[in-house]
Image (cartoon, rainbow, N blue to C red):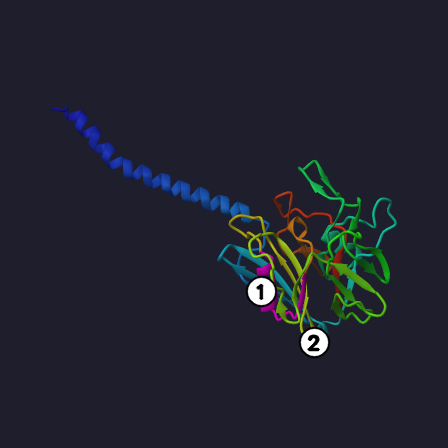
């Protein structure tokens, strides 16, 4: 027989084990919640939202959880109501490239546009580590595709490069894809056409997730739709495929749409009362909130 003291000790152990496990589970749950809350700090809340930025300019935050997490930022510009003008980054007098690299917020501040997104891909570029990357702000770079600003064509694709879609902006601020006006005013290239003639392009990739940036127009050209999708951020937003990006633009009645450069370049900024604010969660070098300096940008001036 066990001594009485041993029996009492075993009985206490039996009663204490569940309590310890309960505290362990509570601690683990609190740790997970704490990590999640800390990870979300500084990012837009993963909640649907809709509000007016300026007269005729509406912001929407779209949140989806299936088949994966996706947080998209959509700005719809009513050209009739907003009285807008568009801008593509002008060239710079810089040796070794066509423009100086700027973040989207730097572009918005320098040119005082009310809305800004990143533009075309560019070279040179690399991102090996936090201390080994290019470009830094101010470094010379050149867009990969056809680029023009105020009638000055400053970049064209290489002869052996795959054709890239082009968005042309006339002096009257009319937007057309792949159909140049009589006289070039502004032009910016993208990675892929997403929608043409109101139909989603056939054969778009439906498996690779990345942060994305895109621009679209409605059938009559009245509405301009700007989309930036966050990505590469577990439990927040995985990104979007080209197919999903096209479907999202289609949901907002885009009749034609083009994907711009994505990945760590995808950034959306707005200038509200003189203060430039990033509306999405960019991710350069896999650091949420970190902006990447890029070559050119698409800017919107709004009458206020």
**Considering the image in quadrants, where does the N terminus appear?**
top left
Above or below, 191 relative to 26: below
Residue 256: in magenta span: yes
- Are there few (<14), some (14-19), or many (20+) residues within 10 Å of tag 1? some
Residue range of the region highlighted in magenta in the rendering: 241-258
Provide the residue designation for mark 2: 220
Residue 109 appears in which quarter of the rendering?
bottom right
- Tell me: residue 18, above or below residue 203: above
What's the distance in space between the residues labelled 2 and 1, CA to CA?
19 Å
Above-or-below relation of 123 to 212 = above
Q: Quadrant of the C terminus?
A: bottom right
Residue 77 locus on image (x, y percent): 68, 69
Q: Residue furthest left?
A: 1
Crowding near the residue tagged with mark 2, few <14, some 14–19, many ≥20 C-alpha atoms within 10 Å: few
Residue 304 seen from this side: no
Q: Are marks 2 and 1 in contact (CB under 8 Å)?
A: no
Label tally: 2
Q: Secondary structure at mark 2?
A: loop
- Residue 132: quadrant of the picture: top right
Q: Circle 1 sits on which residue?
A: 247
* Residue 91 visible within the image: yes
* N-terminal label among 2 and 1: 2
In the rendered image, residue 28, in percent from the top left (x then y), is placed at: 41, 41
Q: Position of residue 299 (x, y in %)?
A: 75, 61
Q: Nearer the viewer, residue 156 or 262?
A: 156
Task: Name which residue lies at 23% across and 33% down.
Answer: 12
* 7 inside magenta stretch: no
**Residue occupying the point 54% across, 46% down:** 39
């Amino acid at each position: 027989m066990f001594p009485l003291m041993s029996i009492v000790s075993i009985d206490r152990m039996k009663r204490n084990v569940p309590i310890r496990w309960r505290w362990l589970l509570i601690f683990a749950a609190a740790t997970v919640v704490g990590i999640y809350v800390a990870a979300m700090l500084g990012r837009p809340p993963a909640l649907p939202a809709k509000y007016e930025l300026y007269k005729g300019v509406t912001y929407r935050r779209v949140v989806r959880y299936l088949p994966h997490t996706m947080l998209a930022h959509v700005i719809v510009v009513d050209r009739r109501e907003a009285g807008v003008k568009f801008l593509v980054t002008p060239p710079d007098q810089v040796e070794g490239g066509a423009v100086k690299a700027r973040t989207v917020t730097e572009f918005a501040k320098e040119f005082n546009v009310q809305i800004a997104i990143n533009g075309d891909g560019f070279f040179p570029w690399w991102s090996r580590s936090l201390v080994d990357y290019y470009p830094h702000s101010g470094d010379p770079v050149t867009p990969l595709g056809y680029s023009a600003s105020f009638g000055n064509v400053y970049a064209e694709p290489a002869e052996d490069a795959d054709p890239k879609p082009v968005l042309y902006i006339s002096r009257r601020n009319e937007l057309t894809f792949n159909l140049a006006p009589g006289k070039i005013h502004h032009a910016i290239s993208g990675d892929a056409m997403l929608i043409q003639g109101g139909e989603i392009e056939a054969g778009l990739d439906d498996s690779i997730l990345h942060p994305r940036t895109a621009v679209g127009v409605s059938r009559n050209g009245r509405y301009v739709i700007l989309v930036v999708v966050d990505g590469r951020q577990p439990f927040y937003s995985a990104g979007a495929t080209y197919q999903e990006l096209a479907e999202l633009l289609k949901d907002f009645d885009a009749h034609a749409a083009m994907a711009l450069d994505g990945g760590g370049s995808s950034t959306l900024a707005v200038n509200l009362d003189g203060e430039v604010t990033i509306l999405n969660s960019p991710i350069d070098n896999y650091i949420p909130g970190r902006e990447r300096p890029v070559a050119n940008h698409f800017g919107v001036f709004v009458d206020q």
